Image (spheres, helix red, strand yellow):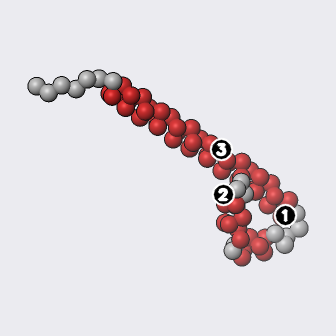
């Protein structure tokens, strides 16, 4: 998904949003909103990646820690 694809998809079929753009000055507000929306989505995506890799790093560390121990049966 490219940076503004979510925004474009959300407003593609928004009849009310299309009417709103016809109001003088609304196109500037919509452009500002799109920039802020896109920036927020990007930050959320980057945060999600950090959490994902952090969790996977922890899982890899645990696996390595346990795989190094010798298991014996009693």
Locate residue 53, reporting x and y percent: 52, 38
Locate residue 18, reporting x and y percent: 77, 73
Which quarter of the rendered picture does the C terminus lie within?
top left
> With 24 as the anchor, is 10 left or right in this view?
left
> With 58 as the anchor, is 12 left or right in this view?
right
Which residue is pictured at 65% across the width and 50% down the height?
41
Relative depth, front residue between 53 and 9: 53
Q: Which residue is mark 1?
A: 27
Q: Are marks 1 and 3 in contact (CB under 8 Å)?
A: no
Q: Which residue is mark 2?
A: 1
Q: Secondary structure at mark 1?
A: helix
Q: Nearer the viewer, mark 1 or mark 2?
A: 2
Q: Secondary structure at mark 2?
A: loop
Dot 1 alpha-carbon crowd within 10 angstroms: few under 14, some 14 to 19, many 20 or more: few
On the image, which quarter does residue 64 sit in? top left
User: What's the CA distance linking mark 1 and mark 3?
Assistant: 24 Å
Which residue is pictured at 61% across the width and 47% down the height?
45
Q: Earlier in the sequence, mark 1 or mark 3?
A: 1
Q: Which mark is residue 6?
A: none
Relative depth, front residue between 25 and 7: 7
Q: Nearer the viewer, mark 3 or mark 2?
A: 2
Dot 2 alpha-carbon crowd within 10 angstroms: few under 14, some 14 to 19, many 20 or more: few
Relative to 17, residue 29 above or below: above
Which residue is pictured at 68% across the width and 66% down the height?
9
Which residue is pictured at 74% across the width and 50% down the height?
36
User: What's the CA distance linking mark 1 and mark 2?
Assistant: 24 Å
Relative depth, front residue between 67 and 37: 67
Q: Which mark is residue 43?
A: 3
On the image, which quarter does residue 17 sit in? bottom right
User: What's the CA distance linking mark 3 and mark 2?
Assistant: 14 Å
On the image, which quarter does residue 21 sit in? bottom right
Relative to 16, residue 29 above or below: above
């Amino acid at each position: 998904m490219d940076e503004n694809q979510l925004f474009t998809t959300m407003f593609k079929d928004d009849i009310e949003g299309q009417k709103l753009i016809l109001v003088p000055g609304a196109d500037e507000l919509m452009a500002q909103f799109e920039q802020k929306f896109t920036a927020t989505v990007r930050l959320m995506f980057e945060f999600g990646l950090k959490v994902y890799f952090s969790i996977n790093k922890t899982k890899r560390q645990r696996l390595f820690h346990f795989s190094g121990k010798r298991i014996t049966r009693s």
